[in-house]
Image: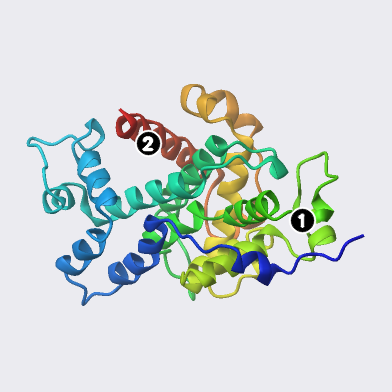
Amino acid sequence: MPPPVPLEKIIDSVDALPAAIQIMPKLQVLLSDANSSISDIIGLIKTDPSLVSRIVKASNTAFFAGSYYCSTIEDAMNRIGFTEAYNIIGYVAASQLFQQDLPLYGLTSDELWSSSVRGASSMQLIGSQLRLVQPYVLPNSGVAYTVGLLRSVGKMLINFFHGTHGIPVLSPLENPLTVKKEKSLLGFDNREAAAALLRKWNFQEEVVSPILFQDTPFECEEVRPLACLLHLTAKGIRDLPPDKLVDEPKSLRPSFKTDSGLLSAINLSPKALFDGLVESTRDFQAFSKDLQT
């Protein structure tokens, strides 16, 4: 059997970084800093003209219905607010990042993109409803969104490297790659790959750690609530068909099973989790429809 490809080599193969992804960690820092000015934030967004046009377009959709037409980024930001602007940047980043099918994992690009954006909106919505006890604090809205958005970026990385350079041990695979297979064949899994890549891209550790520990959230010390929530929302998105979740949620509720220990750890009820998944999926479908017209 040929020797496994080192993770460092795979990480080093990624040179091009979508503009929206480059902006996200910088914008997150600005939004978290009480001393940041509106001009600082808008100035950063203006470094990518395509983002400016997407945010302005979004501000004029039915989703953000307003009484006047926004023609500038300043008008748009006044209408939709910085949280929604950050979400739009994440939406655009996901569309830039997840452009290819992932045959190693049996996923199409549309499935990966949809799952990622739904994961982001679910994390943000449900995260705002947590009732945590000390020493934990309520997750930052933008951090929760980013964690949900980028939770599968390691799969993209492994699939990309295999498609462009080839990983011999993966060539004979007939079934989708799993975390267990990754560890056995590669010596690392897509969670570790995601963490290494996000650190290279200068994302904060509070974003990286929940993604790294999403399968074993109790091992995540400092931001354990986000890791627990990520595990729960990711399973819900994976198990619940989006169309049925929107049109016939009552038919899915009885069969929806989740980890009671994780729910207790973040003081979240099964109903709040399920209802949050429904609401975030509806918002995603409405927003996507508006933005693509």
Give the labeled residue for mark 2.
Answer: 283
Compared to residue 103, the image places residue 190 above or below, namely below
Q: Residue 106: tell me if it is visible.
A: yes
Judge the density around disc 2: few (<14), some (14-19), many (≥20) Cα neighbours within 10 Å. Answer: some
Give the labeled residue for mark 1.
Answer: 167
Q: Amino acid at mark 1?
A: Ile
- Using residue 156 as the reference point, say whether residue 86 is left or right of it: left
Q: Amino acid at mark 2?
A: Asp
Q: Residue at x 80, y 51 (%)?
A: 170
- Toward the right, the furthest residue is 1
- Cβ–Cβ under 8 Å for marks 1 and 2: no
Compared to residue 194, the image places residue 178 above or below, namely above
Give the percent coordinates (x, y) of residue 260. 65, 51
Q: Residue at x 41, y 51 (%)?
A: 93
Q: Residue at x 58, y 30 (%)?
A: 241
Q: Residue 263: tell me if it is visible.
A: no
